[in-house]
Image: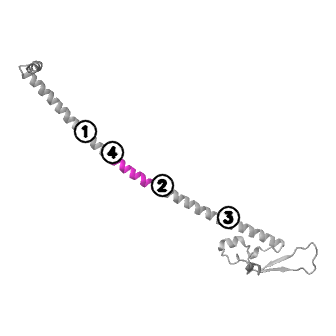
Amino acid sequence: MQPSEISGLQYIVPSNPSPYSVPAFKLSRFSNPLHNLYIPPQLQEIISPHPSCINNSTSDEADEQQLCVINERKQRRMISNRESARRSRMRKQRHLDELWSQVVWLRNENHQLIDKLNHVSESHDKVVEENVQLKEEASQLRRMLSDVQLTSPYSPLTDLEHALADN
């Protein structure tokens, strides 16, 4: 304890002390450092009993006290439910944010895949077109070769034999 805290402590001596008596201490209200702590009104209702909830030990007041206890429990349950609902809303908002993030990511990926598909499709079309041209060239070259062989008095083998013989 700090010296400032001890200043509010008073020892009360009983008028006729017995060997079995316990000394009583009395704390000054102003020496308690937690006395000036701010407590929200909702919590004050739960922590400190209502003036009508003070026990005077009569049966009507006992019933009233029981009602106060029930009301305090309802109040605590209401606060607890509000907190739970707030947490639930926060979870729902986080989940919604994650889903929106996923939507953005998936849309971006979708656009990239569409771009790749368009590029591959264009490349495919070019390759098909080039293949058609090459087939036409091959067909033309075959026709030209067959025309040359038909119109030539020499067969290609005899031309090859003559070329080899000249060397």
Eye-nearest disc, 3 or 2: 2
Secondary structure of residue under mark 2: helix
Give the mark nearest the N terminus, 3 or 2. Answer: 3
Horizontal relation, residue 56 to residue 15: left or right: left
| Residue 15 placement: quadrant | bottom right
* Distance from Cα at disc 4 to Cα at disc 3: 58 Å
Q: How is the image coloured?
A: one colour
Give the mark nearest the N terminus, 4 or 3. Answer: 3
Horizontal relation, residue 73 to residue 117: left or right: right
- Marks 3/2 in contact by CB < 8 Å: the verdict is no
Disc 3 marks which residue? 77
| Residue nearest the viewer, comparing 159 with 45 | 159
Secondary structure of residue under mark 3: helix
Disc 4 marks which residue? 117
* Distance from Cα at disc 4 to Cα at disc 2: 26 Å
> Dominant secondary structure of the magenta stretch?
helix
Eye-nearest disc, 4 or 3: 4
The residue sitting at 79% across, 69% down in the picture is 63
Q: Where's the C terminus, which quadrant? A: top left
Horizontal relation, residue 66 to residue 99: left or right: right
Crowdedness of circle 4 by 10 Å Cα count: few (<14), some, many (20+)? few
Give the mark nearest the N terminus, 2 or 1. Answer: 2
* Distance from Cα at disc 2 to Cα at disc 1: 41 Å
Residue 120 screen position, x and y as percent: 30, 43
Disc 2 marks which residue? 99
